[in-house]
Amino acid sequence: MAELSGNERIAVVVGAGLAGAQCVLKLRQGGWRGRIVLVGEEPHAPYDRPPLSKDVLLGKADATTLDVDYDALGVELLLGRRATGLAPGTLHTDAGDLPYDALVIATGAVPRALPGAERAHLLHTLDDALALRALLRPGRRLVLVGAGWIGAEVATAARQAGCEVTVVEAGRAPLPGALPAEIGRAMAPWYAEAGIDLRCGVGVEAVEPGSVRLADGSHLPADEVVVGIGARPATGWLAGSGVELDASGAIVVDGRLRTGVPGVLAAGDCVSYPSARSGARLAVQHWDHALHSGGAAAAALLGEDAAPYDPVPYFWSEQFGRMVQYAGRHAEGDELLWRGSPEDGSWSVLWLRGGVPSALLAVDRPRDLAQGRKLIERGAALDPALAADPAVALKGATV
């Protein structure tokens, strides 16, 4: 698609998050000579989302704007403009149509709402974070639905603000679906240590004025309710466009992030891409993926000769005074090895597939994470006995 970089060609990137911002930056730096238009639904210039549940909620920052000079790059920012549909060569928006020669879809994901919970808060945008921060005051009773990554971070900030916090999780332990229950149970004591009431194995029936009604019929008093039960790809506007979506709504792309529609690519939280390393298609909704896939989509548009997009997935979470990091992607049937004990100040969990590491979770063990990530990238085989010894550096466990 190198011919698309001519002087009169128009590249439109829809979605002004990290993936979209990275894409326009790499397009211009890579030599795209035509117009570049970045379309965003929010009124704010592209900003970083991870600090929303950390620095913004804690009052350490009021904005997290990315350090990109769009004027100097010659990038046209169209903010407060929502994509509504797609036709060949035309992006439909609520403020009129935009022609394109190349289009990158980077509309990300939106949080899942709890049915019937119109009174509850979601945390997705900067405005969400600022509004929620104003409500986190000493003595306020906060009920958080969902003990996932966002739930733990919001609970951390709320306790630091002096709120009385209860976390309700339908799963058997924190982080159901993301981690095996035995690992989630190892993290459960963190809530009690922070003075948080964690209730697992119970669902929410309804959010009522001043309370939350649980599935068992009991009520929890609540001044505010925050829902953190995951996110779904923001792709509903693509209905009828010819862009293929999987069952979750993620955009199906090839190894160069191209959709089946000519000239249309996708990046960030809204895509499902093939991973040879994992032996499956992956849909990743984390900062590192947004950063790298935005650049990879730009490289594909520029016709650069690059390997298929298949990085080692990585993310981190700061919760309850701990740094939790995860690299790779584990699957059912992988061998699970503990490096240290949850009773220790720091510990890790390593997954092996045929003796080769597939994923690693590290709690305050940055060296394990750094070395494990490289070993996953290399596909290096490990001696399980050595790999399970926390006194042995992971790189020293290779065979």
Image: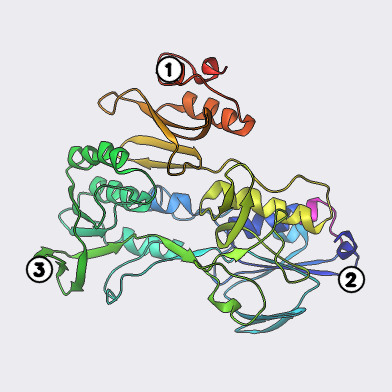
Q: Are marks 2 and 1 in contact (CB under 8 Å)?
A: no
Label 3 belongs to which residue?
217
Amino acid beneath label 1: Ala
- Quadrant where the C terminus sits is top right
Q: Counting other residues with Cα less than 10 Å from the Cα at mark 1, is it few (<14), some (14-19), or many (20 or more)?
A: few
Residue nearer the viewer, 53 or 332: 332
Write the residue at 90% across / 63% down. 3
- Residue 382 placement (x, y as % from top left): 53, 22
Amino acid beneath label 2: Glu
Residue nearer the viewer, 213 or 354: 354
- Quadrant where the N terminus sits is bottom right
Label 2 belongs to which residue?
8
| Mark closest to the chain's N terminus, 2 or 3 | 2
- Residue 257 placement (x, y as % from top left): 69, 58
Camera-nearest label, 3 or 1: 1
Q: CA distance from mark 2 to mark 3?
A: 63 Å
Is residue 241 inside the magenta stretch? no
Write the residue at 43% across / 62% down. 231
| Mark closest to the chain's N terminus, 2 or 1 | 2
- Residue 242 placement (x, y as % from top left): 67, 77
- Residue 398 placement (x, y as % from top left): 56, 18
Location of residue 337 with respect to 213 vertically, above or below: above
Q: Are marks 3 and 1 in contact (CB under 8 Å)?
A: no
Location of residue 150 with respect to 38 vertically, above or below: above
Amino acid beneath label 3: Gly
Q: Is residue 300 left or right of residue 375?
A: right
| Mark closest to the chain's N terminus, 3 or 1 | 3
- Name the mark on residue 385: 1
> Does residue 272 appear anywhere in the picture?
yes
